[in-house]
Image (cartoon, helix red, strand yellow):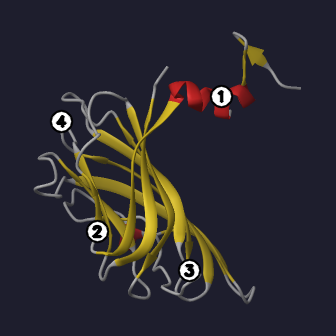
């Protein structure tokens, strides 16, 4: 039985109709083709309290490479915001011989300005792209740190299906106004990243 409240059902909250009315608005979209990185240097401001980045079939030029991101407070001149994060993943191999659910200390950060890993080592085969999303909360606040949550489905270079879950915060009260995505080495051979604004009401 579907419970209703104020004439809005749970299904209505995620319906195409609600999105069309402005709950989630596409701001920009970028498609890589042998690109060193994909940077969003406009469109992240006080207009929305939540920003969503969607990753669609992002594929590296190098094999076994983590997909990563970093934040900027100066419009993209520097991507070096101090971050603290957590990272856990599940995986299952194609041969049905290995499964796991584990916390990965090698891919979390503790007060680091380094790029935050978002995936396991990603395969670079033509059919091995990763997909997922990242939410950035209230980036224009000058009072609070900047929280983020990400969830990724990746094709590990050792033929594993993997799901990565990442959460943390940029430890700054300065406004975040640019975000950069790249693989830890090599280029983004192909893939699309979309930026959406999400209303909080």
Find numbered disc 2 in the image and state the secondary structure of the residue it sits on.
loop
Q: Using the rendered image of the protein, determine whether residue 109 is visible from the camera's viewpoint.
A: no
Viewer-proximal residue among 113 and 196: 196
Vertical arrangement, residue 39 with respect to residue 104, above or below: above
**In-image side of 44 versus 133 (left or right):** left
Q: Which is in the foreground here, disc 3 or disc 4? A: 3
Instruction: Report the front residue among 85 and 19.
Output: 19
Q: Earlier in the sequence, mark 1 or mark 4?
A: 1
- Between circles 1 and 2, the one closer to the viewer is 1
Of badges 4 and 2, the one in the foreground is 2
Which residue has dot 3 on it?
Answer: 128
Q: Circle 1 — which element?
A: helix
Q: Is mark 2 in CB contact (under 8 Å) with mark 3?
A: no
Q: Which dot marks residue 37?
A: 2
Q: Quadrant of the rendered structure where residue 114 is?
A: bottom left
Picture residue at 52% right of the left edge, 70% below the top: 130
CA distance separating discs 3 and 4: 38 Å
The location of residue 42, given as percent across then percent down, is: 24, 44
Query: In percent of the image, x 19 and y 60: which residue is there?
Result: 113
Residue at image point 46% right, 76% down: 59
Q: Neighbour class for label 3 at 10 Å: few (<14), some, many (≥20)?
A: many
Q: State the residue in front, 187 or 143.
A: 187
Which mark is in front, 1 or 3? 1
Label 4: few (<14), some (14–19) or many (≥20) C-alpha neighbours in 10 Å: some
- Where does residue 46 sit, x and y in percent of width and height? 28, 28
- Relative height, residue 130 to residue 170 (above, below): below
Going from N to C along the chain, the mark reached first, 2 or 3, is: 2
Q: Please give the label number shown on residue 173.
A: 4
Q: Which mark is residue 17?
A: 1
Q: Position of residue 51 (x, y in %)?
A: 40, 40
């Amino acid at each position: 039985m579907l419970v209703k409240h104020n004439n809005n059902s749970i299904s209505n909250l995620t319906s195409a109709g609600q999105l069309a009315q402005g709950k989630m608005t596409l701001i920009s979209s970028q498609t890589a083709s042998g690109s060193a990185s994909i940077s969003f240097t406009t469109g992240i401001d006080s207009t929305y309290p939540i920003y969503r980045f969607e990753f669609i079939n992002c594929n590296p030029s190098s094999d076994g490479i983590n997909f990563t991101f970093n934040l900027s407070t100066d419009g993209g001149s520097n991507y070096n915001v101090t971050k603290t994060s957590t990272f856990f993943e599940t995986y299952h191999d194609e041969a049905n011989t290995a499964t796991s659910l584990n916390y990965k200390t090698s891919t979390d950060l503790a007060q680091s300005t380094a790029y935050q890993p978002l995936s396991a080592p990603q395969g670079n085969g033509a059919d091995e792209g990763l997909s997922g999303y990242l939410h950035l909360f209230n980036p224009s606040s000058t009072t609070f740190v900047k929280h983020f949550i990400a969830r990724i489905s990746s094709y590990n270079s050792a033929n594993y299906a993997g799901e990565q879950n990442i959460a943390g915060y940029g430890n700054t009260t300065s406004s975040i106004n640019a975000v950069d995505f790249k693989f830890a080495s090599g280029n983004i051979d192909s893939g699309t990243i979309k930026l959406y604004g999400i209303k909080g009401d």
